[in-house]
């Protein structure tokens, strides 16, 4: 349990770095934006891998009896989460997390939601809570889901302060809830290259996961569970 707590705190602390006023700017100024993004991404992946490894070492303690149909929550929602995560990282987005230069025109994914990366984490983590039904899954995916939801609130607050007059136009043409701005007529859906690439990569990744990749990595086959 101590290793899991240390891994979880490390992961959460690492993802508060962009929220610390001035710290990210100083790091970018010191090593360059591209180097910062590469190093930060690699460290984040390693921290997440450590968190999973520590979680798998915890004892299995059942909290509720999972039903076979619950596996469909993961099968349906996780690919959507992959799509949001990839499209968010690959698309320029002045108001939220992105690997692209913020001064570029906003990507098409922002017509769906201005926080695609955080929604990707919510869908991925939240969909894994339903079918597992054990304490370690709750300890792992619960904080990650809550952290992503709170991240939307704090990211909006920082963007409002950072962007000044620009924030009004962004807020009026985007939404936190997916498709809310489209349904209310404040923006129109569009396609671009990052969006199409994200759909294709998400489809390939999902296929690999369902064809044995998930079982190889984590010892559980969601497709088999859903079809039992």
Image (tube, helix red, strand yellow):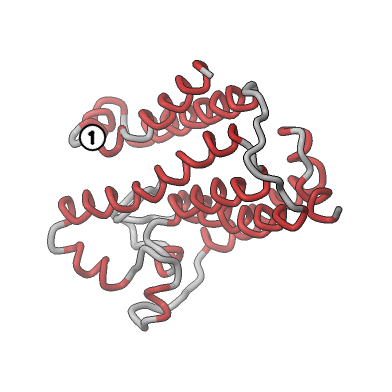
Q: Nearer the viewer, residue 205 or 39?
A: 205
> Residue 118 at x, y = what percent?
43, 50
In the rendered view, tell whether residue 189 sits above or below residue 63. Answer: below
**Point 69% across, 48% down: residue:** 205
Q: What residue is drawn where x is 36% and y is 31%? A: 36
- Is 197 on the left or on the right of 68, as rendered? left
Q: Is residue 47 left or right of residue 76?
A: left
- Image height of 39 relative to 131, above or below: above
Q: Secondary structure at mark 1?
A: loop
Where on the picture, by quarter, is residue 53? Answer: top right
Residue at point 41%, 77% (across, down):
182
Query: Percent x, y for residue 131?
Result: 67, 48
Q: Vertical placement of 9 versus 63: above or below?
A: above
| Circle 1 residue | 20
Q: Position of residue 199 (x, y in %)?
A: 61, 60
Q: Counting other residues with Cα less than 10 Å from the Cα at mark 1, is it few (<14), some (14-19), or many (20 or more)?
A: few
Q: Position of residue 20 (x, y in %)?
A: 23, 34
């Amino acid at each position: 349990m101590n290793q899991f707590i240390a891994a979880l705190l490390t992961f959460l602390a690492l993802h508060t770095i962009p929220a610390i006023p001035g710290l990210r700017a100083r790091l970018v100024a010191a090593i360059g934006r591209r180097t910062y993004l590469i190093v930060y991404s690699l460290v984040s992946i390693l921290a997440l891998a450590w968190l999973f490894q520590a979680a798998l070492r915890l004892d299995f303690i059942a909290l509720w009896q999972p039903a076979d149909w619950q596996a469909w929550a993961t099968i349906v929602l996780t690919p959507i989460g992959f799509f949001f995560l990839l499209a968010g990282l690959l698309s320029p987005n002045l108001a939220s997390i992105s690997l692209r230069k913020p001064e570029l025109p906003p990507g098409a994914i922002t017509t769906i939601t201005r926080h695609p990366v955080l929604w990707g984490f919510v869908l991925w983590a939240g969909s894994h809570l339903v079918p597992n039904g054990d304490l370690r899954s709750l300890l792992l995916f619960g904080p990650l889901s809550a952290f992503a939801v709170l991240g939307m609130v704090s990211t909006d607050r920082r963007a409002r302060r950072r962007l000044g007059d620009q924030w009004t136009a962004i807020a009026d043409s985007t939404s936190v809830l997916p498709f809310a701005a489209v349904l209310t007529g404040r923006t129109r859906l569009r396609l671009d290259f990052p969006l199409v690439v994200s759909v294709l990569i998400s489809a390939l990744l999902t296929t690999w996961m369902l064809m044995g990749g998930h079982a190889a990595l984590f010892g559980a086959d969601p497709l088999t569970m859903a079809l039992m």
